[in-house]
Image: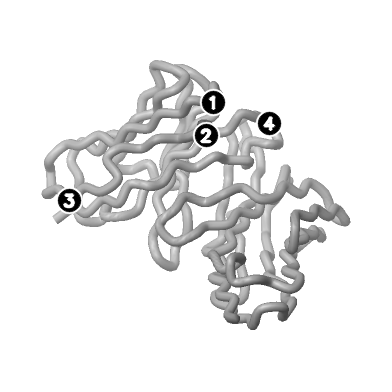
């Protein structure tokens, strides 16, 4: 069974204090790993796709990396507007051609002044 | 503006009273999906559709039905709602199939309470 575990569950940072969020996964035949941001009362917003170990993607203060067992979302010099819940999800194909996306439960990030 | 629109956004109903949550996207996406989000359990897929008239079960399909008669619409039907279907529901769509299926565009969510 596919498993996605995110840690920590919650993280409180001071503005400018860099840190990393972790997404570890167990999936057979990974087709892609996705990062999302979710603000309170909103639907998740797509951030990055990573396909293979060693791949990196960047957007503003965020950088996502991927290994064979986990992904990290690095946040450099965060600002209060980066406060949100960050979700990761893994994708694989099912026998017969269907798709399976499995989400983690997220890391709730709060950045304080 | 590109968007996924869900209705209703909030609903309180009673056990057994059939309801439909509508979902419409204006991006000409082929892939659409329904999720429920519960504290501690994360997002779990209910049903998905790769194209018109093609639907398949996700991880938690029991108690739900869907249909995909048009590309833009993907309603979620609860024939006989029960309290364990109280949840936050999200509709999502994707332009890309294959390996980019997970690049989803989500609606704002529908909070459903079943008494």
SS class, disc 4: helix
- Residues at marks 3 and 2, CA–CA distance in whole angstroms: 26 Å
- Which of labels 4 and 1 is toward the front? 1
Camera-near label (4 vs 2) is 2
From the image, tell me which residue sits under label 3. Answer: B12
User: In the shown orientation, is residue B74 left or right of residue A14?
Assistant: left
Q: Are marks 4 and 2 in contact (CB under 8 Å)?
A: no
- Closer to the chain start, of discs 1 and 3, is 3
Please rate how many residues cluster around mark 4, counting C-alpha atoms within 10 Å: few if below 14, some from 14 to 19, many from 20. Answer: some
Is B1 in front, or is B23? B1
Q: Earlier in the sequence, mark 4 or mark 2?
A: 2
Q: Which residue is mark 2?
A: B93
Q: Which element is circle 1 on?
A: loop
In this rendering, which labeled residue sits more in front, label 3 or label 4? 3
Tags 3 and 4 both on a single chain:
yes
The residue depicted at 52 percent of the width and 51 percent of the height is: A44
Residue A108 image position (x, y, % from top left): 54, 70
Q: Chain of mark 3?
A: B
- Give percent across and percent down for residue B98: 68, 31
Within 10 Å of disc 3 (Cα), the crowding (few <14, some 14-19, many 20+) is: few
Q: Could you confirm whether marks 1 and 2 are on the same chain?
A: yes
- Labels 1 and 2 touching (C-beta < 8 A): yes
Image-quadrant location for residue B5: top left
Q: Residue furthest front?
A: A113
Q: In the rendering, at what x and y percent does residue B53 appear? A: 44, 17
Mark number for residue B98?
4
């Amino acid at each position: 069974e596919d498993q996605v575990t995110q840690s920590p569950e919650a993280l409180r940072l001071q503005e400018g204090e860099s840190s990393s969020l972790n997404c570890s996964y167990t999936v057979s035949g990974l087709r892609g790993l996705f990062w999302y941001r979710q603000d309170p009362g909103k639907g998740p917003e797509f951030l990055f796709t990573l396909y293979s170990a060693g791949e990196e993607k960047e957007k503003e203060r965020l950088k996502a990396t991927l290994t064979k067992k986990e992904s990290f979302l690095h946040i450099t010099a965060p600002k209060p507007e980066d406060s949100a819940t960050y979700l990761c999800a893994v994708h694989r194909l099912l026998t017969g051609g269907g798709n399976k996306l499995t989400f983690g439960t997220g890391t709730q990030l709060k950045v304080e002044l | 503006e590109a968007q996924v629109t869900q209705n209703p956004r909030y609903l309180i109903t009673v056990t057994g009273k059939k309801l439909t949550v509508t979902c419409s996207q204006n991006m000409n996406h082929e892939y659409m999906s329904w999720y429920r989000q519960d504290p501690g359990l994360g997002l779990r897929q209910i049903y998905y559709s790769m194209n018109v008239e093609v639907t398949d079960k996700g991880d938690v399909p029991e108690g739900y039905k869907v249909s995909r008669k048009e590309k833009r619409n993907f309603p979620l039907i609860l024939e006989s709602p029960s309290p364990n279907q109280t949840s936050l529901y999200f509709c999502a769509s994707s332009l890309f199939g294959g390996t980019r299926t997970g690049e989803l565009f989500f609606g704002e969510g529908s909070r459903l309470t079943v008494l």
